[in-house]
Image: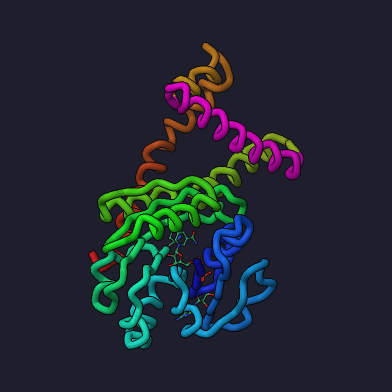
Amino acid sequence: MTLGVIGYGNMGQAIVRGVSRKKLFQEIVVFDVIADKIRRLPGGTREGSLDDVLKADLVLLAIKPQDVAGFLEKEKEKLAHRHLPLISIVAGLPVAFYRQWLTCPLARVIPNTPAQVGESASVVYFDGDFSEEHKEKIKQIFLSLGLVEVVAKEELLHAVTGLSGSGPAYVFLFLSALADGGVMEGLPRDIAKRLAIQTVLGSAKLALQALSEDKSFEDLKDMVMSPGGTTARGVYALENAGFRAAVMQAVSDATKRSRELGGK
Ligand SMILES: NC(=O)C1=CN([C@@H]2O[C@H](COP(=O)(O)OP(=O)(O)OC[C@H]3O[C@@H](n4cnc5c(N)ncnc54)[C@H](O)[C@@H]3O)[C@@H](O)[C@H]2O)C=CC1
Ligand SMILES: O=C(O)[C@@H]1CCC=N1
């Protein structure tokens, strides 16, 4: 099987690297309107024209939402001839939007930037008549980058975008604040940064293990929080500042924005 990729930006590159590492395709062909973007291609990958890309068994669309309508309109004749699946990782735009131009099976996927280190969280929605082989291959593409979930309702992809799609930015904001807190209390910046990263990484690993043991996030928090101790003070400060509500609101607002991008 071969893979064609349209758009070689942050996500296109991360996906091609993961897929190439796992040798999932005989060949990967990449196209970007800015030729300069295509540098240092991994093994089994070559640059090609849009026509070359559209000959592939599976085609990945990885351009910005604002560029999609222009692309589909400009290339509508070429795209009308395509009957093999297209995979879109574009945020917001629903299947109904693509159906103005495309009849081929369409998989919408929301991955996230930790794909760059093989730790992505991706959610897939399939629309149209997919062979089992194609479905399996699409899941493998995103498994090569981390976790994969499949949803049967397209609407859920907006919430996915608000949570895991945008989520890395919230985590980086938290990391930055955690390190700044340490610096404010006198820690050297490099040590504060390493401590902040390891605390988030270690806590995430602990949470993953706890999930398989049926323990809740609350249980884990209670293990850190000694009666009359330091953590209770810190947690109170966060609750008092509306930390949990702010994070929930961030997911909700990003979800709304995803719906807006989709025209709702
Ligand atoms: N960055 C993120 O965290 C996530 C992004 N997404 C989605 O992934 C898509 C790509 O995002 P990024 O990689 O961050 O954007 P990016 O801006 O880094 O990459 C987009 C690439 O598409 C190219 N391009 C634009 N029009 C083109 C055309 N007509 N033909 C070929 N190439 C074209 C651009 O030159 C650029 O290299 C977006 O639709 C975004 O919504 C989805 C989940 C997470
Ligand atoms: O901010 C955005 O629109 C994209 C989609 C999810 C993450 N980044």
Q: Is residue 195 magenta?
A: yes
**How far from the left and from the top, in percent, is residue 139?**
44, 53
Quick check: can you spot residue 200? yes
Instruction: Check the image and report above or below for 142 versus 73.
Output: above
Residue positioned 75% across, 39% down in the render: 191
Residue 20 in which image quadrant? bottom right
Q: Quadrant of the C terminus?
A: bottom left
Q: In the orientation shown, which residue stands out farthest toward the top?
A: 227
Count of labels shown?
Answer: 0
Foreground residue, 136 or 237? 136
Residue positioned 45% across, 79% down in the render: 55
Foreground residue, 123 or 193? 123
**How far from the left and from the top, in percent, is residue 150?**
36, 48
**How far from the left and from the top, in percent, is residue 170?**
49, 48
Foreground residue, 169 or 126? 126
Instruction: Check the image and report above or below for 61 versus 77.
Output: above
What are the residue bounds of the magenta stretch? Answer: 188-217
Main SS of the magenta segment? Answer: helix
**How far from the left and from the top, in percent, is residue 114?**
56, 52
Residue positioned 53% across, 48% down in the render: 146
Q: Is residue 120 magenta?
A: no
Residue positioned 25% across, 73% down in the render: 99
